[in-house]
Image: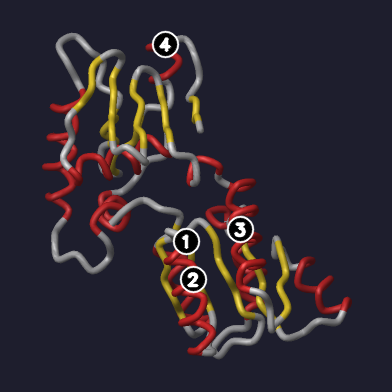
Amino acid sequence: MSTAPRILIVEDEEPLMLLLRYNLEAEGYAVEGVARGDDAELRLHETTPDLVLLDWMLPGLSGIELCRRLRQRKETQRLPVIMLTARGEESERVRGLATGADDYVVKPFSVPELLARVRALLRRAAPARITSRLEAGDVSLDRETKRVRRGERELHLGPTEFRLLEALIERPGRVFSRAQLLDAVWGLDADIDDRTVDVHVGRLRKAINGPRERDPIRTVRGAGYSFDETFAVADSGRSVRRGQ
């Protein structure tokens, strides 16, 4: 599983759900669908996607109430949300935006226009999710060519170690639990345990760290792993940079 931007669709109309999933996956996004508002709330407590497409009228919990609750939680205060609704009146659009939605699309809508709105919102909210090159210190990762370098040295990583480094370097300083790394690298349906993460982190460290080189991967006891946010400053005198 790649670390492509993850989008959660919360929509109870199955034909529309299938249409959205097909077009978003064709654009390269990792997509998950939920049909009920209360189920979506539970899912969002487990993991946070990069963007939510949220229908206004849902069984279990309305989209507008779910959006309000998302804005009340620290973990999801800045989560990009596009509201989907059949309500086109100005007063309803204002209400939707007032609850914290970042954008508002009225059904029926143009799929290309919706995709453009998704790209624009992701670009503003999380530019690292759509750039092809990630850099921190003397470590660089190119998503398109699948190449990793440390200084002048090209590193040879297996597919799993590449995805693991990609997930960590994308958000320097963030501590990822083993469960979160399992989700990002192997997917929720993978039948593997937390020990697998430890094994592959060990392999990644062995691949990227040469003699007398500082290890940028930090183990946080009882919590998980992170790519050290001070690595770029300490090793190269510059902050983390994301290129195009």
Question: Is residue 89 or residue 244 the one in the foreground?
Answer: 244
Dot 4 or dot 2: first in sequence order is 2
Residue 42 horizontal/vertical position (percent): 44, 73
Check whether the beta carbons of the residues at disc 1 and disc 2 lie within 8 A of each other.
yes
Residue 243 horizontal/vertical position (percent): 50, 29
Check whether the beta carbons of the residues at disc 3 and disc 1 lie within 8 A of each other.
no
Residue 73 horizontal/vertical position (percent): 58, 59
10 Å crowding of disc 4: few (<14), some (14-19), many (20+): few
Three-letter code for the amino acid on which mark 3 is drawn: Pro
Q: CA distance from mark 4 to mark 3?
A: 33 Å
- Residue position for label 2: 23
Q: Secondary structure beneath disc 3?
A: loop
Q: CA distance from mark 4 to mark 1?
A: 35 Å
Q: Secondary structure beneath disc 1?
A: loop
In front: label 4 or label 2: 2
**In which image quadrant can residue 222 be found?**
top left
- Residue position for label 4: 236
Image point (69%, 82%), residue name: 107
- Residue position for label 3: 80
Question: Is residue 38 or residue 227 the one in the foreground?
Answer: 227
Q: Secondary structure beneath disc 4?
A: helix
In front: label 2 or label 3: 2
Q: CA distance from mark 4 to mark 2?
A: 41 Å
Dot 4 or dot 1: first in sequence order is 1
In front: label 3 or label 1: 1
181 left or right of 211 in image: right
- Residue position for label 1: 27
Three-letter code for the amino acid on which mark 4 is drawn: Ser
Image point (62%, 55%), residue name: 77
231 left or right of 223 in image: right
